[in-house]
């Protein structure tokens, strides 16, 4: 928000311009103070700016000069406040340039209720800037009526309701707009949220056989549960994991804005779709670094793949190959967030994703296959399976074996049940959960239930108590495993439209626990 008034301190001229920063996923208002004083020509930027902020001096200098404006060759000092907060990225180019033009009285106009965001090119054009959505949101929350952004980012900023968004092609055109010479037209949203979704790449009706696996994935989708697919190579694990996206319910508007904010900060937001309407599907390679998986990195921290999969699916193929990196998933699997603590700051990213893990039973992949012999020794098989720790496996609700598909099923022309029919049942089950958990703290799906909610909503009758007691003894269930079985049984009952968990629902939930003792 650039303030029109220019303060004169003796022979000095001072202007104040407000811009926005992104800390984690939240926007923060930053005040840019510009002082023009007599003396040797210098250009200093202070306020804990990173290399991109320091380099803005050259971009701003060239952009002002190449826009037909006059760059003040005096002693220039720019302060980014609050000074104790680190600033990163090129989004301060435009407010610094506007501050210089206001202080030198080259730009005059009513800009007291406007915000300026954008990176400048050397020719004065405005380029795409990451994180425009959270910046526009904080500007609106702080009472800003109008925001000026690069033309490329106008659709993204317009997702914030009650905000006038003005797309800016260049610094010269913005200066002419402020002075009233050539006004720029506000952006008119052309978003159609109710438009039909594009077809999914994989539909369940195209998957031959594997009916029990499809049922397990339907249960997982209905309650937001984590799944582990264990089977030989070529049995269809990856294909079914990708098909899972086609049976998940569509994103609500609030969920879509959450996901869009993450992709905006990461710079991964598609230009043609400013609002993410489809649940994300993230499949990192097992060589992905810790910072790439959970977030962080040198300098400016960014969300990792677990946050980019928020409200969607995180698919980890060849799970044992990830090794010790898997242990960082414990917190997001339990708390649905990732907290990154550094010496200078601590940021929290959302990570409410469904984990779908796929793995072979051994290094060669054929252990237990009835038609092909395994070449691995028993010790090698054991070491391979122990690459995934017991505590992590305990956080996965559904463990299902994926066998090879025989020729008769593969060659059959018969189609399976389409994803649309499964999606309707999943959506109905999710709606029951939303109504049941309305106003509660943890969330609106069964996978997010806490111990107190489990005690209220996952009660068992006498037969169910006896069955659960036997399961705890025979499967050596931990307290976490016990609660996860109950949550899974609650989801199966919701799919069946039952108010109470019956023995059949509980029995199906128990069968999804791993057969080996951890």
Image (cartoon, grey):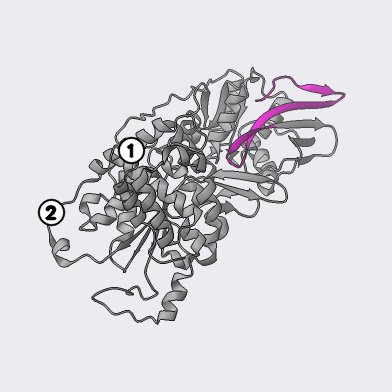
Looking at the rendered image, the disc whose residue lies closer to the viewer, 2 or 1, is 1
Above or below: residue 214 compared with residue 365: above
Above or below: residue 56 compared with residue 94: below
Label 1: which residue? 429
**Who comes first in sequence, dot 2 or dot 1?**
2
Majority secondary structure of magenta residues: strand
Residue 187, can we see it? Answer: yes
Residue at the spot 44% in from the left edge and 45% down from the top edge: 447
Query: Residue 14's image quarter?
Result: top right
Instruction: Measuring from the top left, give residue 27's x and y in whole percent.
Output: 61, 35
Q: Which residues are magenta?
A: 1-30
Image side of residue 418 versus residue 380, left or right:
left
Above or below: residue 41 compared with residue 216: above
Name the disc covering residue 410, or none: none
Could you say whether the residue bearing mark 2 is in a helix, strand or loop?
A: loop
Q: Nearer the viewer, residue 274 or 211?
A: 211
Image side of residue 75 versus residue 487, left or right:
right
Q: Nearer the viewer, residue 157 or 16?
A: 157
Label 2: which residue? 414
Could you say whether the residue bearing mark 1 is in a helix, strand or loop?
A: helix
């Amino acid at each position: 928000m650039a303030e029109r008034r220019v303060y004169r301190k003796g022979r000095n001229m001072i202007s104040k311009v407000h811009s926005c920063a992104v800390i984690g996923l939240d926007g923060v208002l930053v005040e840019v103070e510009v002082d023009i004083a007599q003396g040797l020509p210098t250009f200093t930027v202070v306020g804990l700016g990173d290399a991109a902020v320091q380099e803005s001096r050259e971009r701003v200098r060239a952009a002002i000069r190449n826009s037909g404006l006059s760059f003040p060759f005096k002693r220039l000092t720019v302060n980014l406040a609050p000074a104790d907060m680190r600033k990163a990225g090129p989004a301060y180019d435009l407010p610094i340039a506007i501050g210089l033009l206001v202080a030198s009285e080259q730009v005059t106009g009513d800009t007291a209720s406007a915000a300026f965001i954008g990176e400048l090119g050397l020719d004065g054009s405005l380029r795409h800037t990451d994180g425009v959505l959270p910046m526009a949101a904080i500007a609106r929350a702080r009472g800003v009526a109008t925001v000026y952004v690069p033309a490329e980012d106008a659709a993204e900023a317009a997702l914030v309701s009650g905000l006038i968004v003005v797309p800016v092609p260049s610094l010269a055109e913005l200066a002419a707009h402020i002075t009233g010479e050539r006004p720029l037209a506000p952006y008119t949203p052309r978003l159609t949220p109710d438009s039909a979704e594009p077809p999914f790449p994989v539909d369940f009706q195209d998957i031959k056989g594997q009916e029990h696996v499809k049922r397990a994935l339907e249960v997982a989708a209905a309650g937001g549960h984590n799944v582990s697919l264990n089977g030989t190579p070529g049995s269809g694990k990856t294909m079914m994991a990708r098909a899972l996206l086609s049976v998940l319910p569509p994103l609500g508007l609030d969920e879509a804005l959450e996901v869009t904010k993450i992709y905006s900060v990461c710079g991964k937001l598609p230009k043609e779709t400013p609002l993410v309407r489809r649940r994300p599907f993230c499949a990192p390679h097992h060589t992905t670094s810790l910072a790439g998986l959970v977030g962080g990195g040198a300098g400016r921290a960014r969300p990792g793949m677990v946050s980019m999969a928020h409200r969607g699916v995180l698919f980890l193929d060849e799970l044992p190959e990830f090794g010790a990196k898997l242990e960082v998933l414990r917190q997001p699997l339990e708390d649905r967030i990732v907290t990154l603590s550094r010496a200078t700051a601590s940021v929290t990213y959302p990570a409410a994703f469904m984990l779908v893990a796929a793995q072979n039973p051994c290094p060669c992949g054929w252990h237990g296959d009835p038609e092909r012999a395994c070449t691995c020794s028993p010790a090698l098989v054991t070491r391979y399976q122990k690459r995934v720790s017991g505590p992590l496996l305990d956080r996965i609700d559904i463990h299902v074996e994926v066998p090879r598909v025989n020729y008769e099923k593969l060659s059959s022309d018969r189609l399976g049940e389409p994803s649309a029919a499964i999606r309707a049942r999943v959506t109905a089950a999710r709606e029951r959960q939303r109504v049941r958990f309305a106003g509660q703290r943890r969330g609106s799906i069964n996978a997010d239930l806490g111990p107190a909610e489990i005690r209220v909503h996952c009660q068992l009758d006498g037969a169910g108590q006896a069955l659960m007691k036997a399961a705890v003894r025979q499967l050596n269930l931990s307290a976490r495993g016990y609660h996860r079985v109950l949550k899974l049984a609650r989801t199966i009952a919701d799919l069946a439209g039952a108010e109470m968990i019956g023995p059949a629902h509980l029995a199906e939930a128990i069968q999804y626990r791993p057969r080996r003792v951890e």
